[in-house]
Image (cartoon, grey):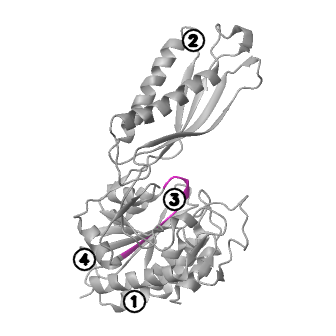
Amino acid sequence: MNDPQEILRKLVAFNVLGGEPNLEIIDWIEKFLSDLGVESHRVYNEEKTKAALHCRIGPAADGGIILSGHTDVVPTVGQPWETDPFVLTQKGDKLYGRGSCDMKGFIACCLASVPHFQQANLAKPVYFAFSFDEEIGCRSGDLTAAAIRDFYPEKPAGAIIGEPTMLRPIVGQKGIMVYTTTVHGSQGHSSRIKDEVDAVQEAARLIVWLEDKMDALIAAGRLDDRFHPNHTSIHTGKISGGSAFNIIANECSFDWEFRNIPLDDADGIINDFQAYCAERIDLKRKTFSGFDVTHVALHPPVPPLDTPEDAPIVELIKELTGISETDTVSYAAEAGQFSRQGFPSVICGPGDIAQAHRANEFVGVGQLGGCMALLGRLAQRLGV
C-alpha cells in the first residue's frame, strides 16, 4: 500500500485522543513498516499504555533527516460534524476526518514514501519519529527526540515536523506553558471580609497581575514582528472558587497559560509571578496564617523554536518546497523540543492550520500530492 489516501483512511479510523492509549495505531504503523522490511522501535510511557515509534530507512550515516508527526488528535465532542469524523470522507478535492490535517496526513505521506526511500539508494538516512500526547502539551516530544539521539550511533542533520503549514517552510514557533494556580484562603461570613482572606479576591489580584505582566513586556519592547500577535501572550481561561455570595471563599483555582516568543524566557515569567505570589502570601498571612498560593504545571514547558535562516535545515526545506521565504507560527509544536535535543528543526506539512481542531477538518488532495512530491525530492537529495 503506497497510496497516501488509503493509508490516511486507515489512520483516521483510529480514534486516539491526546491523553489516551495509542498502542492500536502504533501496532498498525509498526506492522506496516515491518511488511516493507523496516525495523521500528518503541519508546513507552511509564505505564506502557502509550508509545512513540521511530525507525531508520537507509544507512547508518551522519547527515540524515528526521520526519516527525504525532499520532493523537483532539476531541470531536460538541462539534457539528457533517460526516463521521473517524471515517475519511472525500468531497471533491477535500478529505474530511479528524486528524486528516493535524497531522495524520503527513504521517500517511511518510508511510506511503517508504518504497521511494528504499529505492533511492540513500547515502544518508531518513528517520520517522511518531509521538503521542502532542495535543495535550507536547508531552512526548523530548522523549521521542532523545530516543533517536541516543539509539542511533550516527548524527541526524535535522528534523522536519510535519504540522499543517500548506507546505510552507516555518522556522519559528512560540513556546507554551500551562499552569493551575490555587489560592488557599480562610472562610467565614462575608461581613467579616477585613478579618478573613477571600481566595476569590486574591485570585483576581493574581490574574490582573498576569495581564499587567503581559502589558509590561509589550511596553518594554519585547516584540517579534515575525509572530502574530508579535508578543508573548498571557491568558487566564478558567476560574473556579467560592460557594455563595455571602461566604468568604477559602479556595479558588484558575488555569492560565503563556505562549512566549523566543525573546522571552519562560522561567523568567514564572519566577516573576511566583515572586509576586510570595509578596501576597507574606502580606495576607498577617491576617490568616494558613494563607497560601500553590501551582501545578499541567505539562513541562514547551520551548519556542527559532531556527536561524542560514541553518542547513532551512536551506534544505527551501529547496524541497521551492519557497525561499520562511515564516513563523504562534501555535506550539514539537519542533522546539527536537531542536532542544540537538536537531535543528523546521515545520512543514500538508494542510491548513485553520482547519485543525474544528468540525469538518479536512486536508486537500492536492496538499497530499504536494507532500509526496516534497518527500520524493528529499529522497533524491539524500541519494547517492
Question: Sequence-wise, which precedes: disc 3 or disc 1?
Answer: 1
CA separation in Å, label 1 and label 4: 19 Å
Give neighbour class at mark 2: few <14, some 14-19, many 20+ (Cα, 10 Å).
Answer: some
Q: Does the magenta stretch include residue 111?
A: no
Instruction: Residue type at mark 3: give it.
Output: Glu
Give neighbour class at mark 4: few <14, some 14-19, many 20+ (Cα, 10 Å).
Answer: some
Question: Sequence-wise, which precedes: disc 1 or disc 4?
Answer: 4
Question: Sequence-wise, which precedes: disc 4 or disc 2?
Answer: 4
CA separation in Å, label 4 and label 2: 63 Å
Q: Can you identify the residue that label 1 sits on?
A: 116
Instruction: Give the quarter of the image for residue 329.
Output: bottom left
Q: Position of residue 139 (x, y in %)?
A: 49, 54
Q: Can you identify the residue that label 2 sits on?
A: 289
Q: Residue 134 got which mark?
A: 3
Q: What stretch is highlighted in magenta?
A: 127-139
Instruction: Residue type at mark 4: give it.
Output: Ala
Question: Sequence-wise, which precedes: disc 1 or disc 2?
Answer: 1
* SS assignment at label 4: loop
Q: Position of residue 200 (x, y in %)?
A: 64, 24
Q: Is residue 131 magenta?
A: yes
Viewer-side label of 3, 4: 3
Instruction: Give the quarter of the image for residue 159.
Output: bottom left
Question: Sequence-wise, which precedes: disc 3 or disc 4?
Answer: 4
Q: Can you identify the residue that label 4 sits on?
A: 61
Label 1 close to label 2 by CB (< 8 Å)? no
